[in-house]
């Protein structure tokens, strides 16, 4: 138990300090009792999700290894790692929600805020940077604002490992590139309308090669 | 597929060993792999007929002189020999968390020829007496993970994985594990923590993973390209394999070339070829009228080299002698249009974001480096700050559990060393712009922007 005099309720940090560098975790609420391992009987978990998590758990010598795939599956179901998603995963895996949220807050692809169930990761790392990725990213965010892209997480991302396609982006896991800023409106519109994004220009598309003929 | 020649430039021939058939024939499916490039011949050699003992496989790898392709260049045979023999459960983990900026060779190897990796995993596991193998693939590689999962399913169906492989006494389970976006998980001990279902924090070494790794058991961790070489070595013999490359850097090597070149891509070469041949020959060089300003030989974490270093042979020793490192052999080229300050800031920001926060020098050092570079841009820095930036890098290097901090410190320090005058100019330009802004605001009764900031 925390001594209330040492940590008066009025000063406890609940929101991260905006002056802090981005990417750090939000401060924990020390006043909340830690959630215990959920009682499996009292937490409703969709059958499909439960089966999937149990399948992941069965693959490893230690079921804890399934934490990331399980959270990914829950995220797919719920759109993000919401309290509900974490609770359900914790109920199936029989671990504490705190353990799972420690994992969820570490990895970039696990969303801890409801920013959208689809994603556009624009690579702005060095190899893309020297090929004007910043311009492409700015154009995509601008187009997304103008066209009004809801339910889609648009963000800069670490090197996506496709520097031969630079500058490039990952749209729900499909790599598209090389991009110019002129591609931005079409890319955003296609996502909004549910069309295929830049057909023929995705890695793995039939006959896809780089514009200079090299295999990608 | 051969590259289209650049005007006036000679395109050298790629050696096609690891990349044999890529883009030309089907080497992705199990049948294609077996028919077109003699796949699983090494596995049959090891398990059928007289077969090979685990020690024999290990000896072949050792004799080849194969050096780890994940960056450090450590002798693979030696690393594998550290795994204790005995009744305990040994693990093999393939590091497919390729996230080093500028590196995309593993992605292509998996995408075109997943079975070579699977075969390599089986052989390497056999060599160390492992009963579980894991391929930790980064979460962003969704297409490649699906291809790999399909390949593993096919291998199980044919009896190349699972109980009693090809009727032998050896059994192996192979699991493809997807990460969820964290550069640090490419560091071997962080990868193990992540594979155990935790946050990917690096561990204190020793104990090394060969003694206490995954689930506290002996674990061999190898890169995708390293393991992909194993079937070739076992099938065609270490002498054939060693005949490529140089004495100390033998074998074929897939080099990723990116940045300001005309044909970015993966090119398979023998180590020891001149760098110019890679950048100008294969990748078409920088655009006409441009010059190479600086380049990384081994991903963004290797210190930058200059135009004068382009005639060096591309191998571990020469790059180390020139003050950099071969690393993942991923050449990032920046031409003279690239401004050094934004580049350094981009680099530092990446590492700040990816620092796991466990060690203070890395967590604080990467953060302050970004802040100081931003101060230069905003006109808030003084010449002394350049010395401080350099000093911060020195305080990071070698002071953390893993080399993530060093991965920022080394290139930033080398940029500062080679382009100090450009940093100083950028600082003056920043101060000038801030002064202009301040005098504009002064008319409106505002305060000096530098004080306000």
Image: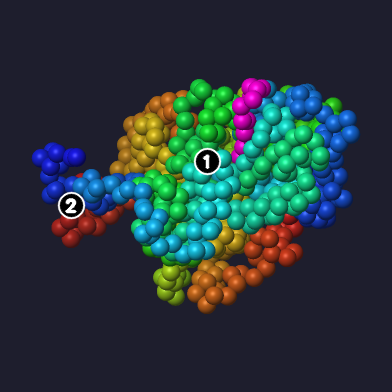
Residue A52 visible from this viewpoint: yes
Q: Which chain does the numbered disc 1 sit on?
A: A
Q: Which residue is mark 2?
A: B447
Residue B340 is situated, as x and y percent measured from the top left of the image, at 48, 43
Helix, strand or loop under label 2: loop
Residue at image point 52% right, 72% down = A191
- Camera sees residue A113: no
For residue B381, side relative to residue B234 (left or right): left
Q: Is residue B44 above or below residue B392?
A: below
Q: Is residue B127 left or right of residue B388?
A: right
Which segment did they paint magenta? B82-97
Taking the magenta stretch, the answer to whether it contains residue B55 is no
Relative image position of residue B245 (x, y in whole percent): 78, 31
Residue occupying the far bottom of the picture: A193
Labelled disc at residue A62: 1
Q: In this orientation, which residue lies closer to the viewer: B282 or A209? A: A209
State the residue in front, B394 or A54.
A54
- Residue at 57% in and 60% down: A173
Q: Please tell me whether mark 1 or mark 2 is closer to you in this view.
A: 1
């Amino acid at each position: 138990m925390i001594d209330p005099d040492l940590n008066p309720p009025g000063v406890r940090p609940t929101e991260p300090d905006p002056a802090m560098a981005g990417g750090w975790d939000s401060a924990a609420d020390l006043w909340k009792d830690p959630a215990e391992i959920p009682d499996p009987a009292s937490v409703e978990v969709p059958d499909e999700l439960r089966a999937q998590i149990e399948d992941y758990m069965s693959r490893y010598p230690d079921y804890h290894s399934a934490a990331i795939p399980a959270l990914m599956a829950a995220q797919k179901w719920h759109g993000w790692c919401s309290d509900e998603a974490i609770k359900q995963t914790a109920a199936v895996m029989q671990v504490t929600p705190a353990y799972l949220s420690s994992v969820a807050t570490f990895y970039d692809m696990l969303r801890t805020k409801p920013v959208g169930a689809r994603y556009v990761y624009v690579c702005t790392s060095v190899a893309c940077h020297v090929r004007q990725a910043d311009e492409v990213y700015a154009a995509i965010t601008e187009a997304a604002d103008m066209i009004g892209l809801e339910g889609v997480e648009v963000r800069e991302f670490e090197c996506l490992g496709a520097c031969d396609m630079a500058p490039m982006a990952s749209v729900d896991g499909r790599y598209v590139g090389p991009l110019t800023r002129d591609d931005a409106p079409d890319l955003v519109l296609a996502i909004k309308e549910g069309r295929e994004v830049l057909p023929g220009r995705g890695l793995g598309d039939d006959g896809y090669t780089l514009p200079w003929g090299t295999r990608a | 597929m051969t590259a289209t020649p650049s005007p006036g430039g000679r395109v050298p021939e790629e050696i096609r060993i690891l990349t044999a058939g890529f883009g030309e024939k089907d080497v992705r499916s199990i049948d294609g792999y077996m028919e077109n490039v003699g796949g699983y011949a090494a596995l049959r050699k090891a398990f059928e007929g007289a077969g090979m003992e685990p020690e024999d496989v290990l000896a072949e790898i050792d004799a080849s002189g194969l050096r780890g392709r994940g960056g450090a260049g450590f002798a693979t045979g030696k690393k594998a020999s550290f795994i204790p023999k005995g009744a305990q459960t040994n693990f093999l983990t393939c590091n497919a968390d390729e996230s080093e900026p500028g590196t995309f060779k593993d992605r292509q190897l998996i995408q075109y020829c997943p079975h070579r990796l699977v075969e390599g995993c089986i052989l390497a596991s056999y060599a160390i007496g492992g009963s579980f193998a894991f391929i930790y693939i980064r979460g962003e590689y969704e297409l490649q993970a699906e291809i790999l999962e399909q390949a593993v399913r096919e291998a199980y169906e044919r009896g190349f994985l699972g109980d009693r492989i090809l009727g032998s006494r050896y059994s192996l389970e192979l699991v493809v594990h997807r990460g969820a976006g964290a550069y640090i998980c490419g560091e071997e001990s962080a990868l193990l923590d992540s594979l155990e279902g935790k946050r990917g924090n690096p561990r204190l070494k020793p104990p090394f993973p060969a003694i206490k790794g995954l689930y506290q058991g002996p674990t061999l961790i190898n890169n995708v390209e390293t393991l992909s070489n194993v079937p070739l070595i076992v099938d065609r013999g270490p002498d054939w394999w060693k005949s490529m490359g140089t004495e100390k850097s033998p074998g074929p090597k897939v080099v990723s070339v990116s940045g300001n070149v005309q044909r970015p891509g993966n090119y398979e070469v023998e180590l020891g070829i001149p760098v110019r041949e890679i950048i100008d020959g294969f990748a078409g060089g920088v655009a006409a009228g441009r010059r190479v300003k600086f380049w990384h030989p081994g991903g963004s974490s290797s210190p930058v080299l200059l135009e004068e270093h382009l005639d060096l042979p591309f191998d571990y020793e020469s790059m180390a002698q020139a003050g950099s490192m071969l690393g993942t052999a991923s050449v990032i080229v920046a031409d003279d249009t690239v401004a050094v300050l934004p580049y350094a800031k981009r680099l530092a920001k990446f590492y700040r974001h990816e620092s796991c926060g466990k060690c203070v020098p890395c967590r604080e050092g990467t953060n302050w480096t970004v802040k100081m570079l931003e101060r230069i841009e905003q006109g808030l820095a003084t010449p002394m700050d350049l010395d401080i930036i350099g000093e911060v890098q020195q305080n990071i290097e070698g002071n953390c559990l893993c080399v993530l901090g060093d991965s920022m410190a080394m290139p930033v320090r080398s940029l500062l060393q080679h382009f100090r005058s450009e940093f100083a100019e950028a600082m003056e330009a920043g101060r000038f712009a801030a002064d202009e802004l301040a005098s504009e605001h002064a008319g409106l009764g505002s305060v000096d922007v530098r004080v306000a900031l």
